[in-house]
């Protein structure tokens, strides 16, 4: 494979889909991961191809270390390389501390944080061989400033910043850069229930740029961090939040 190969976790919908399309447009071969929504994943791949790019689908649960290992090995065997990993797959199970069940805490950590760990570990042997390896972790404004009702999600997203800074140091000698992108409020399935009616008005008042973000706003930051132009940027948290947190 002459093209750089990228794995985008949770690429079937929302932010992951926009990232997958952007990287496809930039000439990368994009492996679109998803866990259940095959139709949406196929639609992402079709959009990549419509835009002149190429890619493949990979169904696995990022929380399942063995499944991640097998999928990454398959990418290595089929394409001979893996240059870019975007850890985007995520879920939010919201609830105030006293109402948060242990199982919900655990699943949120398993998908958002352990999922990224498993993918970094499995991909690292290929990334170290790549000329210009890249890891991008999708964190959140909530990981930096917290949010009442999101204790598990905030812990996972803050943890991603720790993984980012640690791996940025561990992998730097082999020119692999590791960065976080921390979105604010972005209009996707995940936030659909939160950005309606009165809630939307209240949110807009907190955002200096006066709008909810689009998935493409996040994808453009990832596109830049993946490009050769960003080769001297590592260990950073790039905020894409309309000024919500400065
Ligand atoms: P979304 O629309 O709900 O999409 C979530 C994606 O993750 C889907 O592709 C889903 O696959 C995949 N996924 C979920 N669990 C998975 C698992 N166990 N293994 C593999 N894939 C899994 O979410 P989004 O809003 O685009 O969010 C994407 C990322 O950005 C998440 O990490 C989220 O925390 C972060 N983020 C979002 C916002 C926001 O305002 N939207 C703000 C800050 C950070 P299926 O289609 O198969 O279910």
Image: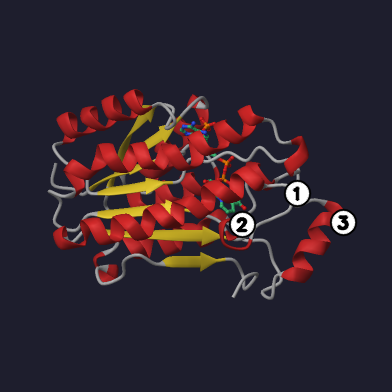
The outermost residue toward the right is: 198
Label 3, label 2: how far apart the Cα atoms are: 21 Å
Between residue 123 and residue 169, name the one nearer to us: 169
| Of callouts 3 and 2, the N-terminal one | 2
Asked if disc 3 and disc 2 are in contact, CB closer than 8 Å, the reply is no
Residue 122, compared with residue 131, is above or below; it is above
Q: Where is residue 162 in the image (x, y as percent from the top left)?
A: 42, 56
Residue 118 visible within the image: yes
Quarter holding residue 81: top left
Task: State whether residue 105 is above or below residue 178.
Answer: above
- Looking at mark 2, is its residue's CB closer than 8 Å to ligand 1? yes
Mark closest to the chain's N terminus, 1 or 2: 2
Tell me, for residue 142, which label it has, or none: 2
For the residue carrying disc 2, how many other residues have a C-alpha within 10 Å: few (<14), some (14-19), or many (20+)? many
Q: Say the numbered circle drawn on residue 198.
A: 3
Asked whether residue 31 is in view, the answer is no
For ligand 1, tell me if the residue under mark 3 lies within 8 Å: no
Q: Are marks 1 and 2 in contact (CB under 8 Å)?
A: no
């Amino acid at each position: 494979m002459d093209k750089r190969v990228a794995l985008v976790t949770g690429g079937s919908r929302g932010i992951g889909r926009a990232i997958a399309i952007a990287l496809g447009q930039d000439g990368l071969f994009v492996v679109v991961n998803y866990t259940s929504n095959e139709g949406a994943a196929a639609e992402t791949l079709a959009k990549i191809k419509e835009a002149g790019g190429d890619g493949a689908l990979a169904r696995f649960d990022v929380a399942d270390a063995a499944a991640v290992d097998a999928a990454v090995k398959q990418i290595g065997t089929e394409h001979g390389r893996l240059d870019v990993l975007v850890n985007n797959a995520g879920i939010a199970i919201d609830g105030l501390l006293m109402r948060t069940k242990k199982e919900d805490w655990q699943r949120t950590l398993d998908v958002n944080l352990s999922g990224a760990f498993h993918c970094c570990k499995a991909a690292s042997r290929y990334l170290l061989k790549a000329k210009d390896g890249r890891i991008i972790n999708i964190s959140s404004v909530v990981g930096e400033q917290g949010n009442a009702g999101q204790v598990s999600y905030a812990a996972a997203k803050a943890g991603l910043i720790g993984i980012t800074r640690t791996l940025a140091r561990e992998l730097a000698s082999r020119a692999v850069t590791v960065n976080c992108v921390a979105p604010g409020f972005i209009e996707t399935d995940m936030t659909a229930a939160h950005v309606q009616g009165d809630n939307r008005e209240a949110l807009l008042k907190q955002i200096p740029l006066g709008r909810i973000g689009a998935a493409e706003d996040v994808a453009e930051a990832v596109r830049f961090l993946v490009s050769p132009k960003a080769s001297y940027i590592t260990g950073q948290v790039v905020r894409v939040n309309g000024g919500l947190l400065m």
